[in-house]
Image: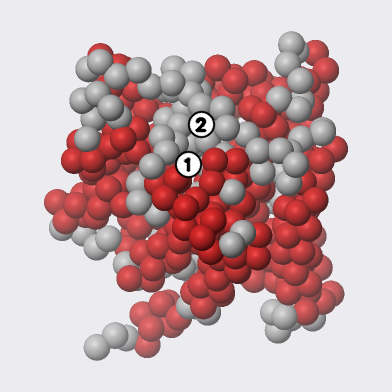
Amino acid sequence: MKTAQAQLKQARYERMIPWLWGYALLLAGAGFLLSRPREILDGLIRIVMTEDALITDYVLIAGPGAALVNSALVTASAVAVLSLSKDVLNGMTLVVIGLMSGFSLFGKNFVNIWPILLGTWLYTKYRKEPFGPYANIGLMATALAPVVSYIALDNGWGTPVWGTLIGLVIGFIMPPLAAYTYRIQNGMNLYNVGFACGLVAFICVPLISSMGATPTTNYHWAEGMNRTFALMLGTLCVSLILAGFFLCRKPAWAAWAGYRWLLMTSGRAPSDYLRMFGTAPTLINMGVNGLIGIAVILLIGGDLNGPTVGGILTLMGFSAFGKHAGNILPVMAGVVLGGFVMHWSLDDSAVQLACLFCTTLAPIAGYFGWPYGVLAGFLHSSVVLYTGSPVAGMNLYNNGFSGGLVAIVLYPTIIAIARRRKPVLKDEDYFENLEQDKPVTPPDKKELEEEAD
């Protein structure tokens, strides 16, 4: 029999699950609003039968309706996995849902994610541990789902059986690898699993190539959907803000005060805003950041399509875990600055994505100050353009990989030179922290935990 304390722990955020199911239904409803059922069915078949390396915009190859319904199916799968695994619900849960719903518009589908998830489940069986604490890692590791699709659909040596086996191996090795890379980035790169997936892709792609395959990056990029997606996303963002102010059983002034307090944090991982500030400020933060993402894409002359909408949904998901207006805008400004001095344009597709996903380095701006955030974004804008080619676009979280490289270089440099401290690894077991749901007090963003020289 469960103790009262255990029951309270499990029930703290259990109301989140019905809302997440509702979100999946909302995505499906939007899909059927944009396309006819037959078009959606044909589009889903096309999505499953497509090699998904970056950039494969499902809106272009299958239509907006099929892309959104695929996102709904993947999101529903993620909610089911989190529910059945009895994973502890917290801010990271919203991150995972944002990632799964966003990237299922350009790379993940309701078929290619399962071998990797099964591989993570097998890892827990091998370790004789419950699957719940690893469910988030398994879901995020589906960043390498294009590897499964490529091998399964390849006309050379690849087959569905080989694709499944490779997916199992990826899912099996990802938990220990992600736990290690989480520490070495010192909480400065929010897309830690993207960095871990990048390392795996750097091994997988050469192996695939050595066996006779020729994986290459793709370029499928939809245009002309700005008004439609801006209206849909804008409505969602405004609804989240209003829900934060008026539907969370908290006075509007208290919700606003909580949001202002949230803006004072650094965002250094782990920063679970749901546990730190509660539901109302977190929802407001998600809505505001989503509107910022929409505005940035439109202002630079970009396109709202599968990849950029996916980037905005990811930005909104991480608004529950480290990102806010104060620490994302300096990093975005660094990318824009790069557009004025480097030999690429801000409306290039890869740069549009960099404008959104560069916010993986938001903790650098929040922890060290906005000038360092601008520097991080400036460096990231160039690094990310070259890290995708060696892995042939097989790592969907390419910005997480390049962000990890930038963070690993910048963090000790800033600490040792500008702050005159010794860069040391933090002692906290980050993954253990992610599996809690008790309220926590936000740390002082000016507090330095590193050792003095």
- Residue on which the image places disc 1: 107
Residue drawn at the location 72% of the way across and 80% of the way down:
247
Residue drawn at the location 55% of the way across and 17% of the way down:
386
Which labelled disc corresponds to residue 217?
Answer: none
Q: Is residue 374 left or right of residue 97?
A: right
Mark 2, secondary structure of its residue: loop
Give the residue type that dot 1 points to.
Gly
- Can residue 216 be seen at all in this image of the molecule? yes
Residues at marks 1 and 2 touching, judged by CB atoms closer than 8 Å: yes
- Can you say which quadrant of the picture contains the N terminus? bottom left
Residue drawn at the location 49% of the way across and 18% of the way down:
389
Mark 1, secondary structure of its residue: loop
- Can you say which quadrant of the picture contains the C terminus? top right
Which labelled disc corresponds to residue 54?
Answer: 2
Q: Is residue 30 left or right of residue 400?
A: right
Whole-percent x, y for residue 208 in the image: 28, 22
